[in-house]
Image (tube, helix red, strand yellow):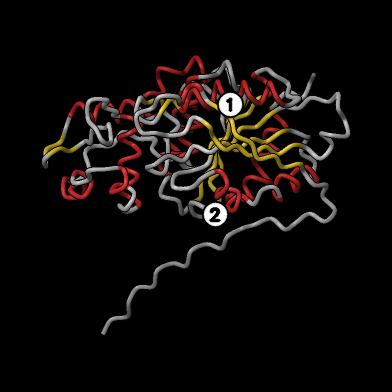
């Protein structure tokens, strides 16, 4: 009997060690009301949970103002769950102790009934672009001692959050001044999935039934709610790219129109406005190919950006990247002047 081929072992999770004596950040868990999310058909709350990390000297230096980094979580998790992956506040404290300049870090919750907003604007989910780029930024500027201009705001995210960083970054250069994109999903336009794969989704008759589907099916529903909303199609208020076994070209076209690699040419002048753009991805991450394509597309237009392909998979190095790469990047590339 031939020997079975061994699957390669997954890479170890890389978590930076606690920096001895690192001063503690101040952690505030708040709710932010978003007018952009009001009245959505899916019933998403416009009152969103947000975690705010304030620098250790925030209370002792009442005249000091700070840049802000907005960091977006991935699909199927919340901002609170993401803290377990990126090991905050430990990694933020470690970054400061290792020399990163003081800044405020904000983690908003963009989880939805289908496990993710795709950080897109949709009548079905509500306008999550508007929540991040307008309502959240306005709230943080109004309630904390920020430096309230684009050159002092950074946007970052991982996976679905990397998609959101790319999408929102392309559209709102007047709000943000630097981008850090981690293992972004959903970069390429996709064709219709196999009809067989959508049978279970087509049979769903309520949001409760949808919540019992598997990860992949729910991800398809999240994409449809974000990119092919349909206010005339209750109870889910969305259109799928396959109906009764037949591909739906109009829906597929809508999905393609939301793929950053398909839409990026429209936003080159916006992307030129960023002081710095960086991205990273693991060499064993299935999203590596499209991340490299994003980098190469920016390069082809002469837009400076840094790409690092590191040893790891989709989640193995996220905490290390957050502390030792993302935070120093913003420390270097945001404006800290009053």
What label sits on residue 49 in the rendered view? none
Above or below 45: residue 96: below
The residue located at (78%, 37%) in the rendering is: 55
Residue at (83%, 25%) from the top-left corner? 64
Residue 13, x across and y down, in percent: 58, 60
Q: Position of residue 146 (x, y in %)?
A: 73, 24
- Where in the figure is residue 14, as x and y percent of width and height? 61, 58
- Name the one closer to the observer, 27 or 71: 27
Q: Disc 1 to disc 2, how far (Cα)?
A: 34 Å
Secondary element at tag 1? helix
Q: In which quarter of the image is the N terminus?
A: bottom left
Residue 311: numbered disc: 2
Is 216 positioned to the left or the right of 325 in the image? left
Which of the two discs, 1 and 2, sits closer to the camera? Answer: 1
> Position of 295 compared to 141: left or right?
left
Asked if residue 136 is positioned above or below residue 80 in the image, the reply reads above
Which residue is outermost to the bottom?
1
Instruction: Give the quadrant of residue 207.
Output: top left
Examine the image and state in which quarter residue 99 appears. top right
């Amino acid at each position: 009997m031939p020997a079975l081929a061994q699957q390669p072992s997954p890479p170890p999770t890389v978590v930076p060690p606690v920096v001895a004596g690192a001063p503690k950040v101040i952690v505030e868990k708040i709710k932010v009301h978003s007018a952009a999310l009001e009245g959505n058909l899916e019933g998403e709350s416009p009152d969103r949970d947000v975690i705010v990390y304030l620098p250790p000297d925030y209370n002792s230096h009442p005249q000091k103002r700070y840049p802000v980094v907005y960091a977006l979580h991935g699909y199927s998790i919340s901002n609170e769950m993401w803290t377990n992956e990126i090991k905050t506040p430990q990694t933020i404290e470690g970054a400061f102790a290792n020399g990163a300049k003081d800044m405020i870090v904000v983690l908003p919750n963009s989880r939805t009934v289908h496990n993710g907003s795709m950080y897109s604007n949709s009548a079905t989910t509500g306008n999550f672009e508007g929540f991040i780029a307008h309502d959240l930024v306005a709230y943080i500027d109004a309630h904390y001692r920020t430096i309230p201009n684009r050159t002092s705001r950074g946007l970052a995210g991982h996976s679905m959050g990397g998609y959101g960083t790319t999408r929102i970054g392309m559209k709102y250069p007047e709000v943000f001044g630097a981008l850090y994109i981690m293992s972004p999903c959903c970069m390429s336009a996709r064709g219709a999935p196999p009809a067989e794969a959508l049978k279970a989704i087509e049979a769903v008759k309520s949001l409760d039934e949808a919540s019992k589907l598997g990860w992949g099916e729910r991800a398809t529903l999240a994409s449809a709610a974000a990119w092919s909303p349909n206010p005339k199609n209750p109870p889910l208020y969305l259109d799928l790219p396959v109906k009764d076994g037949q591909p739906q070209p109009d829906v597929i076209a809508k999905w393609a129109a939301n793929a950053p690699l398909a839409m990026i040419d429209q936003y080159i002048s916006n992307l030129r406005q960023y002081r710095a753009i960086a991205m990273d991805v693991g060499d064993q991450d299935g999203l590596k190919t499209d991340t490299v394509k994003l980098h190469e597309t920016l390069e082809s237009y002469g837009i400076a950006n840094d790409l690092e392909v590191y040893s790891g998979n989709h989640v193995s190095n996220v905490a290390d990247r957050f502390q030792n790469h993302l935070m120093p990047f913003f420390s270097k590339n945001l404006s800290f002047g009053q």
